[in-house]
Image (cartoon, helix red, strand yellow):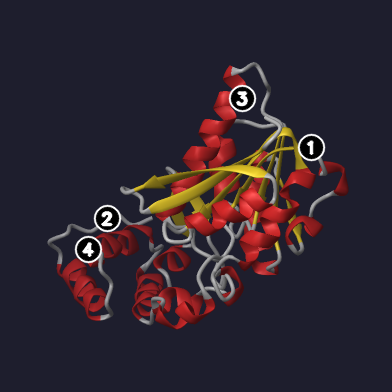
Amino acid sequence: MPRPASVASPRFAEIVTLLRAAGCVFAEEEAQLLLSEAPGLDELTQWIGRRVSGEPLECVLGWAGFSGLRIAVDPGVFVPRRRTELLVSEAVTLLRQRLAAGEEPGVVVDLCCGSGAVGVAVTSQVPVKELHAADIDPAAVGCARRNLATLGGQVHQGDLYAALPSRLRGQVQLIVVNAPYVPTDVLPTMPPEARIHEPRISLDGGPDGLSLHRRVIVEAPEWLDPSGLIAIETSERQAAGTAGIMAAAGLVARTVHSEELDGTVVVGTLRSQ
């Protein structure tokens, strides 16, 4: 691996100029990453061209920084966002609360897992009995399997809960979900990095952005154990809608928001608790 170039070097300045012209907001940081990660000059030239053409930096590098980890990201797979670190921190807090109450962490399910970033980040901080992840996209499933391999997690391909082993019904301690929640008519306004280079299925949440939330939440009580929880990422504007769907499904909802991360999560628990 080449040594990082000095930020004052001509090559660095040239790359920054190219990235800025392409609309990269964090051109200096990206230029340093490209220089430090590229195996050689030919690869660096190719990587710069890919980034300038609008491909997400994470796909160019092959990894994304997320919750202090490097998560493998393949081209065409949804790139984990920093805001989703709030979902991870809430999930970790919930599991640690159960540990403090004398309950061993059991089964965790990461639905709409994409690269598997959420499941990996959660269980890297709190080891659990079983980690299962599921996604309908074959490319995402392949990527997630690589990321979960070292943790012994299982990744299933299919449509939401239909992908999971039936034996998990009524046994899941925590469901974490980063399902698509962008309203369909908003998709054309998204940055080209997402609109062009990420699969529409990982972005499109239907007319109001909550179509997948309805499907995930309505079945959740069937899969949760008696004290199980579900934590789902949403937007601040849509949080009331997500919480309302939980209430209709017999769950008690609590909304958490982080200004620093610009993230919003709704946590649901069974009414019997």
Categorize mark 3 by other alpha carbons within 10 Å: few (<14), some (14-19), many (20+). some
Report how far apart the C-alphas of labels 4 and 3 lie in the structure. 43 Å
Q: State which mark lies toward you, 4 or 2.
A: 4
Please state which amino acid type lies under the numbered disc 3.
Arg
* Disc 4: which residue: 28
Please state which amino acid type lies under the numbered disc 2.
Pro
* Disc 2: which residue: 4
Report how far apart the C-alphas of labels 4 and 2 lie in the structure. 13 Å
Residue placed most toward the observer, 33 or 87: 87
Instruction: Give the SS element for disc 4.
Output: helix
Up/down of 11 relative to 145, above or below: below
Categorize mark 4 by other alpha carbons within 10 Å: few (<14), some (14-19), many (20+). some
* Disc 3: which residue: 98
Which quarter of the figure is the C terminus placed in?
top right
**Which circle's residue, 4 or 2, is located before the other in the chain?**
2
**Which circle's residue, 1 or 4, is located before the other in the chain?**
4
